[in-house]
Image: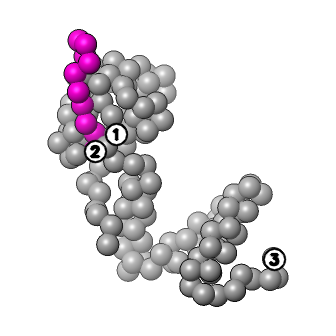
Amino acid sequence: MPRKSPELGEAELQVLRILWDRGACTVRDVLEALHETGRKVAYTTVLTTLTRLEQKKCVSSNKSGMAYVYRARVSRDRIVESRVRSLAQQLFDGAPGSLVAPLLESGRFTPEEIAQFRELIDRLDQQAGTPPDSDR
């Protein structure tokens, strides 16, 4: 069973997204990235958020020159998987199909995304020993 990811607030997720997208960053780097998105926060707020993420073992830091440099320790995929699993548990008693169906029914997808879905379904069929659907 995959490890459960720590509970993360919206501000923590925003900071993690910056680290995932940009790689290693100083507090000032994260602050500037947040300002670029229109989120005006203080330096100390970013520092506190990074400190909390480090306590939750989601980021690590090391001193490089005059500033600490922060890196994500947890992958985006791990957080997504944990949050989706938690949402399925909360809303659908853990049934992932019940979570996916409304997303597929209510969304508009590009042809590329639909092709990705088909590839994933074919791969899941192969793992289950079911032949791929020949009607597609």
Residue at numbered disc 2:
58
Q: Where is residue 81 in the image (x, y as percent from the top left)?
A: 42, 61
Residue 66 lies in magenta, yes or no?
A: yes
Amino acid type, mark 2: Cys
Residue at numbered disc 1:
72
- Magenta-tinted stretch: 58-67
Asked which secondary structure carries label 1, the reply is strand
Structural distance between the alpha carbons of marks 1 and 3 = 40 Å
Q: Position of residue 95 (x, y in %)?
A: 44, 80
Residue at numbered disc 3:
136
Other-residue count near label 2 (Cα within 10 Å), few / some / many at <14 / 14–19 / ≥20: many
Q: Earlier in the sequence, mark 1 or mark 3?
A: 1
Tell me, yes or no, whether the two marked residues, 1 and 2, touch with CB atoms within 8 Å: yes
Say which quarter of the image contains residue 48.
top left
**Which residue is located at x 50 percent, y 72 percent?**
99
Q: With 105 as the anchor, is 83 left or right in this view? A: left
Residue 106 lies in magenta, yes or no?
A: no
Say which quarter of the image contains residue 94.
bottom left
**Which residue is located at x 53 percent, y 78 percent?**
97
Structural distance between the alpha carbons of marks 3 and 2 = 42 Å
